[in-house]
Each structure stands twice: as C-alpha cells, then as structure tokens.
Image (cartoon, rainbow, N blue to C red):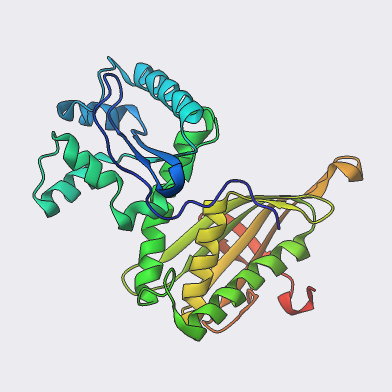
C-alpha cells in the first residue's frame, strides 16, 4: 500500500526569535547538522481575528496573513531539511496558557504550545501545497485526528505509541488487516471510509478519502491512515462495538470510465468485523451490508 506524505513524529523544534510578519514558528539545528522548522497556522478568519490581541502577525487581514505564511513556508523549504506545520487553535492555546500559567501575549508561551509533546500528532509535513485550497483544511483535520488519537491512546493505557504489549500489537495488526480487506474487496475506485466506535468518554470516529488504482496501489493521506488503524485497534483491543461504511464510485478509467455508486457497511460487536445485519446510516450515508471480509484474500 503506497501512501501520500511523510511520517510526522517527534518534536524537532525549539523556540527562536520573532519574525516581523509571522511569529508562529520554531527552528532548531538537530544533531548531525539537520535543520528543522515548525510553524503554527491560523485556520480561518475567525481564528485570525481572535488572535489579534496576541500580535501573532502584523498582517492587516486573513488573506494577507496567508500570503505572508506561504512566503515564510517557501523560504523555510529553501533553508531547512524538514518543514512541518500544525493548526494554531486559539481556544486550545488559551487553555494551554491557563493550565501552565503563561501569558498568551508572550512569544515563550507560543513556543511551548507548538512543541507540546501531546500535540505532536497534529503535525503535518509541508511539501509546497496551496495553503487555502488544500493544506489548511488538512491542518484542521489533523487537529481533530490528533484529539481522537489521544483518546484512543488513553483507552489503550498509553500503548498506542509506546510499547503496548502483545495484545495491542495484535489488535493493531488485525485492524490494519480489516481495512486492507475492505479495500481489496471494493476494487478500483474512489471511496470514503467512515468509522465510528463506541467508547468510554465519547465515541471514536474517523474518515478518510481513498483512491485505489487497478493494480491495487492505494493513495491515502498518512495522517488519515494512522487514525483509521488506531480507531480499529482501540475497538478490537477493548472489544468495543462499532460501525464502518465504505462508499464512493467503484470502477476505473481502464474500464472506459464506467463507475458505479456503492456503499457497504460492516459492524463489530467488539471482537471482529462482519457485514452489517441490515441497511444502516452513518453520518448521513446510507449503506447496505458489505461483503464477508473472510472471503477476501
């Protein structure tokens, strides 16, 4: 299975001095001379206006802020080995400052917020994407995904990223295999997988768009694949009930552009995944019982 994007683990940045036009970034020279760069990006006009009091940017409006940020990222790509970004969420930032007794107007507070270890799952590698058209929406999803990953990790007693023991490793392997069999059975096409698992403290949910070619090559954002496997893992490890719907256009250009709209559903009682007992609806998507995953090689 091929994936789009690069791994985004481990904080590699510490605070650096302010920049005149965009002040939400951190730099460091790692061991061996590798240079890394991390930036926090405000994800909308409302967030931009809410953050004005902290003087995070000198831009007069959000459009200008995005232009400045794009310039800064392009400059960083020329000068650093690694460039990463995450959504700078004003409410998260305020709560972080309150928890740690920090002044949100101080650059040091922003430094600590961006490199806070529990938030590192929200980091994405930046590879030159358009900010408004593609990258900023991905940053928003990465924040949401990161919160779900933290919840899943708590359910597994911290075993999702650390040494979780044989049971967690086996559950993760089984979850990845469930996802693989869903895709193999679907064949070539453009799909979206929606997943919901009932869990203590609130349900776990995940969604990802998937492109599968005729030769079986799959394209999916790394952060979305990580989230799907983590939610499946937590559900199987804790034996939690769940529901999954795979829907989209089945077919390929090789078949003269013939596509068929499809929607399949599977349910789990906690120990395994099987076709749903009847028609279901998840997040507004209606689906019929899926194919038996055990028949898919």
Residue at (58%, 46%) from the top-left corner?
Answer: 5
Left or right of residue 167, residue 40 in this image: left
The outermost residue toward the front is: 32
Q: Quadrant of the N terminus?
A: bottom right
Residue 193 percent across, percent down from the top left: 60, 57
Left or right of residue 103, residue 288 in this image: right
Q: For residue 55, what is the image quadrant?
A: top left
Count of marks placed on residues: 0
Q: For residue 151, what is the image quadrant?
A: bottom left
User: Is residue 88 positioned above or below 161 on the image?
Assistant: above
Residue 63 percent across, percent down from the top left: 38, 18
User: Is residue 19 positioned above or below 272 on the image?
Assistant: above
Is 246 in front, or is 3? Answer: 3
Residue 282 is at least partly visible in this image: no
Residue 161 percent across, percent down from the top left: 43, 68
Q: Quadrant of the C terminus?
A: bottom right
Residue at (54%, 31%) from the top-left corner?
Answer: 129
Is 242 in front, or is 19? Answer: 19
Is 152 in front, or is 248? Answer: 152
User: Is residue 25 positioned above or below 277 on the image?
Assistant: above
Residue 162 percent across, percent down from the top left: 42, 72
Residue at (49%, 67%) from the top-left corner?
Answer: 231
Is 36 in front, or is 152? Answer: 36
């Amino acid at each position: 299975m091929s994936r789009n994007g690069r791994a985004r683990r481990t904080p590699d940045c510490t605070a650096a001095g302010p920049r005149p036009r965009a002040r939400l970034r951190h730099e460091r020279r790692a061991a061996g001379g590798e240079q890394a760069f991390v930036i926090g990006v405000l994800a909308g006009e409302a967030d931009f206006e809410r953050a004005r009091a902290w003087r995070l940017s000198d831009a007069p409006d959000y459009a200008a802020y995005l232009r400045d940020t794009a310039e800064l990222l392009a400059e960083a790509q020329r000068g650093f080995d690694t460039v990463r970004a995450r959504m700078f969420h004003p409410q998260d930032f305020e709560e972080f400052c309150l928890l740690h007794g920090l002044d949100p107007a101080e650059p040091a507070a922003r430094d600590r917020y961006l490199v806070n270890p529990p938030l590192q799952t929200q980091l994405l590698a930046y590879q030159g994407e358009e900010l408004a058209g593609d990258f900023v929406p991905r940053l928003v999803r990465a924040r949401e995904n990161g919160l779900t990953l933290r919840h899943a990790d708590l359910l597994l007693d911290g075993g999702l990223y650390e040494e979780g023991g044989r049971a967690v490793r086996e559950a993760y392997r089984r979850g990845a295999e469930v996802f693989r069999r869903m895709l193999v059975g679907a064949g070539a096409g453009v799909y979206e997988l929606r997943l919901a698992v009932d869990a203590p403290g609130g349900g776990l949910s995940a969604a990802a768009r998937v492109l599968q070619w005729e030769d079986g090559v799959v394209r999916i954002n790394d952060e979305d694949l990580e989230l799907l496997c983590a939610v499946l893992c937590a559900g199987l490890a804790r034996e939690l009930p769940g529901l999954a719907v795979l829907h989209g256009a089945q077919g390929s250009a090789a078949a003269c552009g013939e596509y068929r709209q499809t929607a399949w559903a599977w349910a789990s009682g906690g120990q395994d995944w099987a076709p749903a007992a009847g028609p279901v609806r998840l997040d507004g998507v209606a689906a019929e019982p899926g194919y038996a995953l055990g028949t898919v090689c």
